[in-house]
Amino acid sequence: MAIRLIAFDLYGTVLDYGALVETLRAYSPMPEAALDAWRQRQLQLCNAAAMPGRYVDFDRVTLQALTEIAPRFHMKPSPEDLKRLIDAWAQLPAFPDARAGFEAAERRWLSPIVLTNAVASTARNALVHAGLASHVKHVISADTVKSYKPKPVVYHQVAALGVEPAEVLFVSGNDWDCTGARQAGFQTLWVARRRSLTFKPERKIETLLELETVLRDLELSHR
């Protein structure tokens, strides 16, 4: 089925949360390890919060994850420090190839959207800060359905935009996210920003600079 919509994941795909290492350097002697632990605990808490009756939003999940991992990495953040660290998720830089990915979609008359676990307002602020907001017409948030990716209900929100799941190309740098999107009926494209030892992607690129070639090939295959 021909692609009518391109949906991008936000963190780890469009925005580089790896930049938080420099922010954490002021708080821990092990900033790289602290960030890895923070991200992993964040994802674990999202999975737990996706259970019925247990939902809390992504900002609160991110705060809880940080407070839980902080002692392991000799972090003693004050309330002001915690706010600064949580706010940093809305102040991340874009990956250098992110704008090119959005522009590739626009050249094919495919208005890009963002489909994210983040609270919509946080995601929009992050896109503004990264200078990418003008490329994104819609931000679809897991917060609307009180669940988290990779639950199908999060991806299926795109139906409100008048498309079938198979008409969506979902682009993510997170392997688990691509798996969830594929199970929800999307076509998927994995941006291999991090290694994955077991994941077998439907489609794979190393950088969003390759997106235009993928879109051209998909367009030709459906003529």
Image: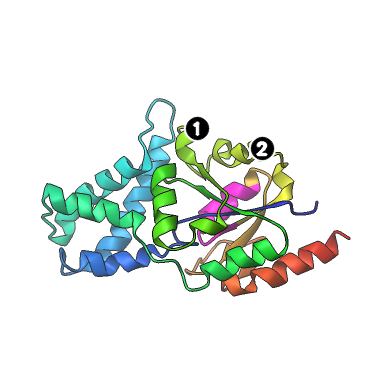
Residue 197 or residue 180, whichever sits in front: 180
Secondary structure of residue under mark 2: helix
Report if residue 114 is visible in the image.
Answer: yes
The quadrant holding residue 189 is: bottom right
Which residue type does callout 2 highlight?
A: Ala
Q: Magenta residues: mostly which secondary structure? A: helix
Residue 134 or residue 171, whichever sits in front: 134
Question: In the drawing, does residue 54 fall left or right of residue 103?
Answer: left
Q: Residue at x 46, y 69 (%)?
A: 95
Q: Is residue 213 above or below residue 39?
A: below
Magenta residue check for 137: no
The span from disc 1 to disc 2 (Cα, nearest Å) is 13 Å
What percent of the width, then of the height, locates residue 69? 22, 53
* Magenta region: 171-182
> Which quadrant is home to the C terminus?
bottom right
Question: In the drawing, does residue 92 fall left or right of residue 5?
Answer: left
Label at residue 131: none
The quadrant holding residue 159 is: top right
Q: Which residue is mark 2?
A: 159
Which residue type does callout 1 highlight?
A: Val
Report if residue 119 is visible in the image.
Answer: no
Q: Which residue is mark 1?
A: 145
